[in-house]
Image: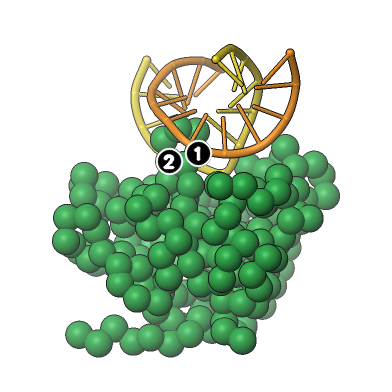
Chain colours: A green, B yellow, C orange
Amino acid sequence: MSFYELPAEVVAPALLGATLEVGGRDGVTRRGRIVETEAYVGAHDLACHASKGRTARTEVMFGPAGRAYVYLVYGLHELFNVVTGAPDDPQAVLVRAVEPEAGTSGPDGHERGDGPGRLTRLLDIDRRLLGSPVDRPPLVLYAGAPPREVAVTPRVGVSYAGPEWAEATLRFVDAGSSHLSVSLARLGPSGYSSRGRRAPSRTPST
DNA sequence: TATAGGATTTAC
DNA sequence: TAAATCCTATAG
Protein backbone atom coordinates (compact mmCIF):
# COMPACT_ATOMS: atom_id res chain seq x y z
CA MET A 1 0.00 0.00 0.00
CA SER A 2 1.31 3.41 -0.88
CA PHE A 3 1.70 6.33 1.49
CA TYR A 4 -1.25 8.20 0.01
CA GLU A 5 -3.60 5.24 0.49
CA LEU A 6 -3.36 5.79 4.23
CA PRO A 7 -6.25 7.61 5.95
CA ALA A 8 -6.40 11.39 5.45
CA GLU A 9 -5.88 12.01 9.14
CA VAL A 10 -2.56 10.18 8.89
CA VAL A 11 -1.41 11.74 5.63
CA ALA A 12 -2.36 15.30 6.62
CA PRO A 13 0.12 15.73 9.52
CA ALA A 14 2.76 13.73 7.61
CA LEU A 15 2.72 16.28 4.79
CA LEU A 16 3.82 19.08 7.12
CA GLY A 17 7.37 20.00 6.17
CA ALA A 18 7.07 18.52 2.69
CA THR A 19 7.80 20.66 -0.35
CA LEU A 20 5.14 21.17 -2.98
CA GLU A 21 6.52 21.83 -6.46
CA VAL A 22 4.45 23.02 -9.39
CA GLY A 23 5.40 23.60 -13.01
CA GLY A 24 3.49 26.74 -13.95
CA ARG A 25 1.72 27.51 -17.19
CA ASP A 26 4.47 30.01 -17.93
CA GLY A 27 7.17 27.35 -17.70
CA VAL A 28 8.38 28.56 -14.31
CA THR A 29 8.76 25.99 -11.51
CA ARG A 30 7.65 27.16 -8.08
CA ARG A 31 7.98 25.61 -4.62
CA GLY A 32 6.64 26.03 -1.12
CA ARG A 33 7.03 24.21 2.17
CA ILE A 34 3.74 22.90 3.55
CA VAL A 35 2.92 24.22 7.03
CA GLU A 36 -0.83 23.67 7.34
CA THR A 37 -3.19 20.90 6.23
CA GLU A 38 -6.66 19.58 6.93
CA ALA A 39 -8.07 16.06 6.68
CA TYR A 40 -11.43 15.29 5.05
CA VAL A 41 -12.00 11.76 6.13
CA GLY A 42 -14.66 10.20 3.94
CA ALA A 43 -18.28 10.07 2.83
CA HIS A 44 -19.49 10.09 6.44
CA ASP A 45 -17.62 13.36 7.10
CA LEU A 46 -20.29 16.01 6.58
CA ALA A 47 -17.64 18.64 5.85
CA CYS A 48 -16.24 16.53 3.03
CA HIS A 49 -17.59 17.30 -0.44
CA ALA A 50 -17.92 13.57 -1.03
CA SER A 51 -20.59 13.37 1.68
CA LYS A 52 -22.98 14.67 -1.00
CA GLY A 53 -22.32 11.56 -2.99
CA ARG A 54 -20.36 10.60 -6.06
CA THR A 55 -20.76 13.41 -8.59
CA ALA A 56 -18.75 14.88 -11.44
CA ARG A 57 -17.14 17.26 -8.99
CA THR A 58 -16.15 14.68 -6.37
CA GLU A 59 -15.31 11.89 -8.81
CA VAL A 60 -11.55 12.18 -8.40
CA MET A 61 -11.85 11.54 -4.66
CA PHE A 62 -13.38 8.14 -5.43
CA GLY A 63 -10.39 7.23 -7.58
CA PRO A 64 -6.83 6.20 -6.76
CA ALA A 65 -4.89 7.99 -4.02
CA GLY A 66 -2.07 10.40 -4.73
CA ARG A 67 -3.88 12.54 -7.27
CA ALA A 68 -4.89 16.18 -7.10
CA TYR A 69 -8.40 17.30 -6.24
CA VAL A 70 -8.67 20.97 -7.22
CA TYR A 71 -11.90 22.93 -7.10
CA LEU A 72 -13.21 26.48 -7.16
CA VAL A 73 -14.81 28.13 -4.11
CA TYR A 74 -16.69 31.39 -3.93
CA GLY A 75 -16.26 31.78 -7.65
CA LEU A 76 -12.70 32.99 -7.13
CA HIS A 77 -10.32 30.64 -5.40
CA GLU A 78 -8.84 27.36 -6.51
CA LEU A 79 -8.22 25.02 -3.56
CA PHE A 80 -5.71 22.18 -3.70
CA ASN A 81 -6.12 18.74 -2.11
CA VAL A 82 -4.38 15.39 -2.34
CA VAL A 83 -6.64 12.36 -2.61
CA THR A 84 -5.96 9.68 0.00
CA GLY A 85 -7.45 6.35 1.01
CA ALA A 86 -8.52 3.40 -1.11
CA PRO A 87 -10.57 3.79 -4.29
CA ASP A 88 -14.27 4.21 -3.44
CA ASP A 89 -13.29 5.57 -0.04
CA PRO A 90 -13.33 9.31 -0.76
CA GLN A 91 -10.83 11.08 1.44
CA ALA A 92 -8.57 14.05 0.83
CA VAL A 93 -6.06 16.37 2.46
CA LEU A 94 -6.52 20.08 1.89
CA VAL A 95 -3.28 22.07 1.80
CA ARG A 96 -4.02 25.37 3.55
CA ALA A 97 -0.65 27.13 3.75
CA VAL A 98 2.90 27.01 2.46
CA GLU A 99 6.04 29.02 3.10
CA PRO A 100 7.29 30.17 -0.32
CA GLU A 101 10.75 28.92 -1.22
CA ALA A 102 13.25 31.72 -1.71
CA GLY A 103 12.72 33.24 -5.14
CA THR A 104 9.23 31.84 -5.59
CA SER A 105 6.42 34.24 -6.42
CA GLY A 106 3.25 33.89 -8.42
CA PRO A 107 2.84 34.57 -12.15
CA ASP A 108 1.10 37.80 -11.12
CA GLY A 109 3.74 38.72 -8.55
CA HIS A 110 1.73 37.40 -5.61
CA GLU A 111 4.09 36.45 -2.79
CA ARG A 112 2.01 34.89 -0.05
CA GLY A 113 1.23 31.28 0.71
CA ASP A 114 -0.66 31.64 3.98
CA GLY A 115 -4.14 30.53 2.98
CA PRO A 116 -5.64 27.85 0.73
CA GLY A 117 -6.58 30.32 -1.98
CA ARG A 118 -3.31 32.22 -1.69
CA LEU A 119 -1.01 29.24 -2.11
CA THR A 120 -2.70 28.15 -5.30
CA ARG A 121 -2.26 31.66 -6.68
CA LEU A 122 1.38 31.66 -5.55
CA LEU A 123 2.16 28.31 -7.15
CA ASP A 124 -0.09 28.67 -10.22
CA ILE A 125 -2.33 25.76 -9.27
CA ASP A 126 -5.74 25.56 -10.90
CA ARG A 127 -8.14 22.99 -12.25
CA ARG A 128 -5.90 22.09 -15.17
CA LEU A 129 -4.14 19.93 -12.53
CA LEU A 130 -7.32 18.14 -11.46
CA GLY A 131 -6.55 14.43 -11.35
CA SER A 132 -2.79 14.85 -11.84
CA PRO A 133 -0.58 12.48 -9.85
CA VAL A 134 1.46 14.31 -7.23
CA ASP A 135 4.67 12.35 -7.77
CA ARG A 136 5.78 13.65 -11.14
CA PRO A 137 5.88 16.98 -12.96
CA PRO A 138 4.12 19.25 -13.22
CA LEU A 139 3.09 18.35 -9.66
CA VAL A 140 5.61 16.92 -7.20
CA LEU A 141 5.59 16.48 -3.44
CA TYR A 142 9.03 16.06 -1.89
CA ALA A 143 9.52 14.74 1.62
CA GLY A 144 10.97 17.19 4.12
CA ALA A 145 11.96 17.27 7.75
CA PRO A 146 8.90 17.13 10.03
CA PRO A 147 8.21 20.29 12.05
CA ARG A 148 9.63 20.39 15.56
CA GLU A 149 6.14 20.80 16.93
CA VAL A 150 2.79 20.01 15.36
CA ALA A 151 -0.43 21.53 16.71
CA VAL A 152 -3.94 20.23 16.07
CA THR A 153 -7.10 22.34 15.87
CA PRO A 154 -10.59 22.17 14.41
CA ARG A 155 -10.93 22.80 10.67
CA VAL A 156 -11.62 26.25 9.30
CA GLY A 157 -14.85 27.36 7.64
CA VAL A 158 -16.88 24.17 7.98
CA SER A 159 -19.47 25.17 10.59
CA TYR A 160 -22.21 24.23 8.12
CA ALA A 161 -21.28 20.58 8.72
CA GLY A 162 -22.70 20.64 12.24
CA PRO A 163 -20.96 20.63 15.62
CA GLU A 164 -19.52 17.15 15.50
CA TRP A 165 -17.65 17.63 12.24
CA ALA A 166 -16.95 21.33 12.68
CA GLU A 167 -15.25 20.71 15.99
CA ALA A 168 -13.34 17.58 15.05
CA THR A 169 -9.61 18.22 15.40
CA LEU A 170 -8.54 17.52 11.85
CA ARG A 171 -6.40 20.58 11.11
CA PHE A 172 -2.64 20.17 11.48
CA VAL A 173 -0.14 23.00 11.58
CA ASP A 174 3.58 23.54 12.04
CA ALA A 175 3.35 25.30 15.40
CA GLY A 176 6.55 27.22 14.69
CA SER A 177 5.45 28.69 11.37
CA SER A 178 4.61 32.34 10.89
CA HIS A 179 2.80 31.58 7.64
CA LEU A 180 -0.42 29.97 8.88
CA SER A 181 -3.80 30.91 7.41
CA VAL A 182 -5.35 31.35 10.86
CA SER A 183 -3.22 31.95 13.95
CA LEU A 184 -2.92 29.20 16.50
CA ALA A 185 -4.17 31.57 19.16
CA ARG A 186 -7.45 31.90 17.35
CA LEU A 187 -8.49 28.25 17.07
CA GLY A 188 -6.26 27.03 19.84
CA PRO A 189 -3.96 24.03 19.80
CA SER A 190 -5.31 20.80 21.20
CA GLY A 191 -1.80 19.66 21.85
CA TYR A 192 0.15 17.10 19.86
CA SER A 193 3.70 16.00 19.62
CA SER A 194 5.63 15.55 16.47
CA ARG A 195 7.19 12.38 15.13
CA GLY A 196 4.90 11.06 12.49
CA ARG A 197 5.32 9.12 9.33
CA ARG A 198 6.96 11.07 6.56
CA ALA A 199 5.90 11.74 3.03
CA PRO A 200 7.57 9.48 0.46
CA SER A 201 11.03 10.66 -0.34
CA ARG A 202 11.71 12.06 -3.71
CA THR A 203 14.75 14.23 -3.69
CA PRO A 204 15.02 17.09 -6.16
CA SER A 205 17.64 15.81 -8.58
CA THR A 206 19.06 19.06 -9.78
C1' DT B 1 -34.48 25.89 -15.73
C1' DA B 2 -33.82 28.66 -11.46
C1' DT B 3 -31.74 29.60 -7.18
C1' DA B 4 -28.93 29.37 -2.98
C1' DG B 5 -24.61 29.06 -1.03
C1' DG B 6 -19.74 27.87 -0.57
C1' DA B 7 -13.03 23.93 2.64
C1' DT B 8 -11.92 32.53 0.81
C1' DT B 9 -9.71 36.85 0.05
C1' DT B 10 -9.65 41.64 -0.31
C1' DA B 11 -11.19 46.18 -0.09
C1' DC B 12 -14.08 49.78 1.82
C1' DT C 1 -18.68 44.38 6.97
C1' DA C 2 -19.52 43.29 2.37
C1' DA C 3 -18.45 42.42 -2.38
C1' DA C 4 -16.37 39.58 -5.79
C1' DT C 5 -17.79 35.71 -8.91
C1' DC C 6 -18.93 30.91 -10.83
C1' DC C 7 -19.82 26.20 -10.17
C1' DT C 8 -22.40 22.62 -7.83
C1' DA C 9 -26.19 20.72 -5.78
C1' DT C 10 -31.07 20.83 -5.05
C1' DA C 11 -35.63 22.14 -5.85
C1' DG C 12 -39.43 23.13 -8.86
Q: What amino acid is labelled 2 in the image?
A: His
Please give the chain letter of the residue carrying mark 1: A
Q: Is residue A69 above or below residue A53?
A: below
Instruction: Please state the horizontal and vertical placement of residue A163, each as a whole percent of the image.
Output: 82, 44
**Tags 1 and 2 on a common chain:** yes
What residue is drawn where x is 56% and y is 71%?
A64
What residue is drawn where x is 54% and y is 59%?
A60
> Quarter holding the N terminus of chain A?
bottom right
In the image, A42: left or right of A84? right
In three-dimensional space, the C-alpha distance between marks 1 and 2, rounded to whole angstroms, equals 5 Å
Q: Which of the pair A23/A186 is nearer the observer?
A: A23
What residue is drawn where x is 31% and y is 57%?
A123
Q: Is residue A37 visible?
A: no
CB under 8 Å between callouts 1 and 2? yes
In the image, B12: left or right of A66? left
In the image, A41: left or right of A145? right
Figure quadrant of residue A31: bottom left
Classify mark 2: helix, strand or loop. strand
What residue is drawn where x is 65% and y is 77%?
A6
Instruction: Please state the horizontal and vertical placement of residue A52, each as a whole percent of the image.
Output: 71, 45
Please give the chain letter of the residue carrying mark 2: A
Q: Which of the pair B7/A128 is nearer the observer?
A: A128
Name the residue that disc number 1 marks. A73
Q: Which of the pair C10/A153 is nearer the observer?
A: C10
Q: What amino acid is labelled 1 in the image?
A: Val
Q: Is residue A177 above or below residue A5?
A: above
In the image, A147: left or right of A190? left
> Residue A77 shows which numbered tag?
2
Figure quadrant of residue A29: bottom left
Instruction: Please state the horizontal and vertical placement of residue A107, each as a whole percent of the image.
Output: 21, 50
